[in-house]
Amino acid sequence: MNPLGTDEIRFAHHAPCATFPVVGGEIAPGGIPISRLAERAGRTPFYVYDRQAITARVRSLRDTLPKALHLHYAIKANPMPALVQHLSSLTDGLDVASAQEMMVALDTGVEPTRISFAGPGKTAAEIRRAVAAGITMTAESEAQLELAVRSGEALGIRARVALRVNPAFELKASGMKMGGGPKPFGIDEARVPQVLDWMRDQPVQLTGLHIFGGSQNLRSEAVVDAQAKTYALGRRLLEHWGRPVEWLNLGGGFGVPYFPGEQPLDLMPVAEGLHALCERASQEIGAPLVIELGRYLVAHAGLYVCRVLERKESCGQIFLISDGGLHHHLSASGNFGQVLRKNYPVAVANRIGDPLDSVQSVVGPLCTPLDLLADRMQLAHAEPGDLIAIFQSGAYGSTASPAGFLSHPPAAEMLV
């Protein structure tokens, strides 16, 4: 319970946030008031990630989902080394999408067999590095598969390879569709049996199958449906393979509420479906199921914090001109896949509890009208020097943004 007498931070139109405590009227990630964190960072803007919030999310999942289910962290959501180190001790595996992410994962000290490397565009050198490291190279094409096999032969080892399957179905209501129809991701479902037949006579170890229909889904019934279809497809393909594997990866897709009117994903139906699938997997394929989550583990635990430089009125509209913008947080600006721009949850971080009675827009320092972080939102009254916090910023923030745009300084990052 925080000093306001509630465990939730309220917004005018977004779902409330119960992630961070409030101390002396300020958001306090890790129990530290935001103004003190700004001094600790040495500058604004900065990202701050709350390790307790990440730990609590993983524990909640562990308590709700089947014990037999393996939980992986998809590093692409947030590759900050300290954050990845923290999650490496909480999860069963790490999924990477580049050679640099692979090095971050290996630096945590986890067993290489707990790391997998996905991505539609891998160079021969990257594939060879993955094979040499002993991690699982997820083949997104037959060409990648053959490169992995030949790399293993050249190194005198059996390459660890998983096949990513492009399913004929897609995840309904997902924000980004990663499967179904023509896609750069994975080997088309119809081609996989032939590929498996080719692999039988090759010096390669098939560790499992990776099937991922889509991401950012807030509809539990759509997630349950996709996981059931994914399991059925995986089971059919593994029956064709006829040999043991280490796991069947059902992908992720768990969404988080970013925009007005959105509500958190209801996990209970998803958990019930996964309990049934895990029981079937134990009996039918003799291998555990894996889900890989990125944003769901870290988005809620992150804030992007910038400082108001000027309060300006133009034609009756109030603009809070800040030192942060789309070059640090592209997704909050609405330029990372949104068709119609919508606001992230935003608050005046050092005035929590003040009435939300001032309609203000938060803009950045860049010479473009796209540099908009909050468009006519009901916020507490803010003045120069106040701190603006953008919530749900722990995933696809700093590394998903054009940091070099207009040559402004980068944002700092910290884990508290």
Image (cartoon, rainbow, N blue to C red):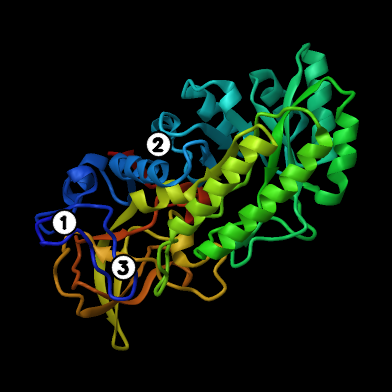
Label 2 or label 1, whichever comes before in sequence order? 1
Decide which of 55, 23 is in the foreground and name it.
55
Where residue 178 appears, as percent x and y from the top left, is 67, 55
Vertical comparison of 326 with 130: above or below = below
Q: Amino acid at mark 2?
A: Leu
Q: Nearer the viewer, mark 1 or mark 3?
A: 1
Label 3 or label 2, whichever comes before in sequence order? 2
Instruction: Decide if residue 402 is in sight here.
Output: no
Label 1 or label 3, whichever comes before in sequence order? 1
Q: Amino acid at mark 1?
A: Glu
Q: Residues within 10 Å of mark 1 (few under 14, many from 20)?
A: many
Q: Residues within 10 Å of mark 3 (few under 14, many from 20)?
A: many
Marks 2 and 1, Cα distance to the nearest angstrom? 24 Å
User: Answer yes or no: do the residues labelled 2 and 1 have beta carbons within 8 Å?
Assistant: no
Q: Residues within 10 Å of mark 2 (few under 14, many from 20)?
A: some
Marks 1 and 3, Cα distance to the nearest angstrom? 21 Å
The residue positioned 71% from the left and 39% from the top of the image is: 209
User: Answer yes or no: do the residues labelled 1 and 3 have beta carbons within 8 Å?
Assistant: no
The residue positioned 81% from the left and 32% from the top of the image is: 242
Where residue 134 appears, as percent x and y from the top left, is 65, 20
Vertical comparison of 146 with 29: above or below = above
Location of mark 3 (residue): 321
Q: Nearer the viewer, mark 3 or mark 2?
A: 2
